[in-house]
Amino acid sequence: MNSNRFPLALAGCALGLTIGAAAAAEALAATVAPVATSAPLIPRQAIFGNPTKAAGRISPDGRWLSWLAPLNGTLNVWVAPATNPGAAKALTKSTERPIRQYFWAPDGKSVLYVQDKGGDENFLLYSVDPVTGAERNLTPFQKTRVEVIGDSTIHRDRILIGLNNRDPRYHDVYSLDLASGKLTPVLTNTGEYSGFTADNDLVVRLASKSNAAGGQDFYRVTGNVVADKPFASTTLDDALTTAPAGFTADGKTLYWLDSRGRNTAALIGQDVASGATRVIAQDPRADIGEVLAEPLTGRIEAYAADYLRNRWTALDPKTRASLDFLDKRLVGDFHVTSKTLDDGKWVVVNDPVTAPGKTWLYDRAAGKLTELFTSRPELVGAPLQPMRPLEIKARDGLTLVSYLTLPPGSDANADGVPDHPVPLVLLVHGGPWARDSYGSNAYHQWLANRGYAVLSVNYRGSTGFGKTFIAAGNLQWGARMHDDLLDAVDWAVAHGVTTRDKVAIMGGSYGGYATLVGMTFTPDRFACGVDIVGPSNLETLLKTIPPYWTPVIAQFHQRMGDPTTPAGLALIKERSPLYKADRIARPLLIGQGANDPRVNKAESDQIVEAMKAKGISVTYVVFPDEGHGFAKPANNTAFNAIAENFLAPCLGGRAEPIGSAVSNSSAKIVEGAQHVTGLAAR
């Protein structure tokens, strides 16, 4: 906590075909010449294994530095005195799952982290004393997901949290004493509120609730009693681009990220007493996505808007001087990940893209920048490739912000186009209400190193580009959203990046769904596909979403199709790849976490069974200890080992042999081990 960054998140070759089609696929593969490159093969482990160090933080009092690093092969929290980073010690002792989210308590007396079990996303909150190493589970409940609602620079010994242990659909508000672990009820959520906003005094000031229009109603809270009527509302149009962003420390100003009356989300300051608002920052092409705030006052010091790249603008001279200082001394983009309470020291991560990222300690008063660590030193000197931001026009004129990475040695004059067309992997982001951005991307670097151009496309419905762009994706799953992906591939073909017969589609979550759509709706467009935790049946997807998503189900129905109406049910069935599984004619690889609470394992099971019923082969890999994606590096590395050996005969690229990667993981090969070189059934 106290990160002072507020990302706008309102609210990743198996021959799957018949015997006859297999012969055609073999003929196709034979026409694909391997990519000639002298660049060394980067080991999968160097890209997808544990980082040496990551997620650097500084405690609010400046006494401690912390980061994530492996302990006996599992990511844990390490701490060191800020005056002696070399004296680091492992603070946590997790063995089952890597710790991926942690933060310092406001008083700096403990490290707090969240952890689930087997990927079920029922995150509990834990506390560890950095001096003694004593650890406690602060939320010792079953089937409970904790949310942090607020912290304070005044009451630094406690925080506000939300717990859904009374009703899995809704979170009640509690005050948590960090020293004793005592939980004190603050507000029981019997009104079906989807979220709460507190001030620096740890007083709940706002509640939000989904409305019939697909947006949110915002209510004032006084004395922990929610008002009868909302003071502000959104409809579906503004639902993903408008939300409170917190109060100043004195409680007099409420910040909003707000698209009401405009297209992109602007940074708005609202005087609490009068209700008057003023525009602090806006960008015509992109939402304001992040801010830096002064820790003690809560006053916003800088903001960022991410169109092609994330760009910071300072609002006061001192912050401008600090950002300019960092910009001159660091190669690539940078982010401030934590601050001391006095705002005197920042932990900064910079991302050169063509080299591994570094984490620095910035002493603002001294004007001193000290390197703390390189996250993946094994990638120093590796042939990492530049990422190129692009604007691609869809068939209806919509601009699709996209990112292209080319294989090493393929672009001698560095003009962003390979000297000769190369195979391409269309890498589709999840969400779909999320986005791709510029920066280091493990999948781009891995696939480019194997000999493929990699193209990521912000198709309509992606966030970050204003509400009109999001709305263009309403009811367009498997329709115009898919057309955008096809249009991007056509662009790549027209510009000599690739040829039409050398394109694979790959993605996770919605990206997995897009892969299944590509293989079923347009079965002749992609040479092969890799689906990771992708839904195959939108009807069953909506029936099995986690209970804590209940408040936003109306928005899902309006953006995807409403299964409670005959027309809506017909639409989502029409857009479900399951019902077109018999059209699959090219190799397909599917990866699934058995405990996935978002995209239930049945989503993958269904389409695999449908393919088997039609005599269509598929390779299906299940990880019994994973959820929505593969958190454990051994599992992630194993699936990617399978994936690259799946892609190589399909597209003609390179592959590191599977070796022991799969046997060192929990992977269960349910179907189709024989279709991937080096893959044995487990």
Image (spheres, helix red, strand yellow):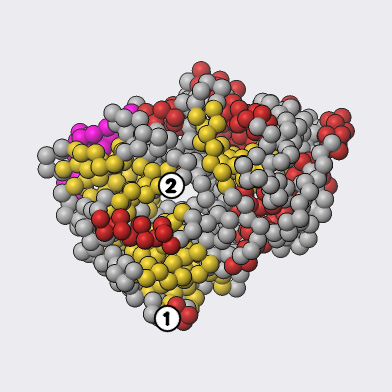
In the rendered structure, the answer to whether residue 170 lies left or right of residue 381 reads: left
Residue 44 part of the magenta-drawn span? no
Q: Is residue 623 above or below residue 218?
A: below
Residue 226 part of the magenta-drawn span? yes
Assess disc 1: are there few (<14), some (14-19) or many (≥20) residues with their C-alpha within 10 Å of its C-alpha. Answer: few
- Indicate the secondary structure of the residue bearing disc 2: strand
Answer whether labels 1 and 2 touch (C-beta < 8 Å): no
**Residue projecting furthest to the left:** 274
**Residue projecting furthest to the front:** 413
Q: Which mark is residue 533?
A: none
Query: What's the distance in space between the residues labelled 1 and 2, CA to CA?
Result: 33 Å
Q: Is residue 651 above or below residue 443?
A: above
Q: What percent of the width, then of the height, locates residue 39?
A: 73, 56
Q: Residue at the spot x=23%, y=50% of the render?
A: 247
Q: Which span is picked out in magenta?
A: 216-236
Image quadrant where residue 96 sits: bottom right
Q: Amino acid at mark 1?
A: Asn
